[in-house]
Image (tube, helix red, strand yellow):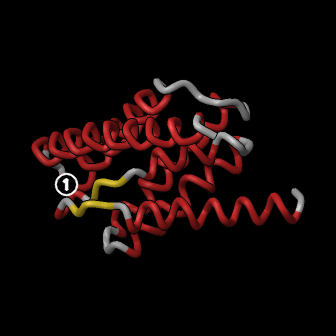
Amino acid sequence: MSVKRVGQFLASLVIIFLITVLLKYKLGNLGYLNISLAAIIILCRHYAPGYAIILAGLPTAAADLVLKCGYYAPYTFIIKGLSGFLTAWLAGGKKLKNSTVFLLGAIEALGYLLTDLYLFGSRTMALYSLLYSLIQIVLCAAALGVYNLIIRKR
């Protein structure tokens, strides 16, 4: 990997971290709503799947630690890392279809549903988590829509 490419990768890590930390809405014990999936889809499609796991998982798990939701960090690393891997694998360096956000969002929603069942042992908490995940999918789809409009106008 060239020095330029390493710099781009490091900048992408920082961007995903900042989007996750700064553009969020706290949900009490259930973490927070954010649009990190949109950033993951935009950035991970430019990397090989192995790099995309780190690019998606590391900054989002670090955000959990910074935002005092550290109990989610290992699960976030796995769930978001899988999203990054699938983004890179599905894209192969090309533009992704808009439906990708719904596929990846569904995978993340299932991951967090299972995580909350495990962490809290409560179906009610898990169902709230599912609702919040669905809201997050819509937010990410909107963010990607705005991004695609801006990119098309260039």
Query: Which residue is tagged 1?
Result: 120
Using the image, determine if residue 46 lies above or below residue 152. below
In the image, is 112 to the left or to the right of 46? Answer: left
Q: Quadrant of the C terminus?
A: top right
Q: Residue furthest front?
A: 153
Q: Nearer the viewer, residue 42 or 154?
A: 154
Q: Secondary structure at mark 1?
A: helix
Residue under the point 79% across and 63% down = 6
Out of 102 and 108, give the one closest to the viewer: 102
- Where residue 2 appears, as percent x and y from the top left, is 89, 59
Q: Amino acid at mark 1?
A: Phe
- Of residue 86 and residue 150, the one placed in the foreground of this image is 150
Q: In the figure, 83 relative to 2: above or below?
A: above
Crowdedness of circle 1 by 10 Å Cα count: few (<14), some, many (20+)? few
Q: Residue at x 72, y 45 (%)?
A: 47
* In the image, residue 90 above or below residue 20: above
Q: Is residue 79 at all visible to an observer of this figure?
A: no
Count of marks placed on residues: 1
Expressed as whole percent of the image width and height from the top left, the position of residue 128 reads 15, 44
Horizontal relation, residue 69 to residue 12: left or right: left
Indicate the position of residue 26 as horizontal and vertical percent values: 23, 63
Q: Quadrant of residue 31?
A: bottom left
Foreground: 144 or 17? 144
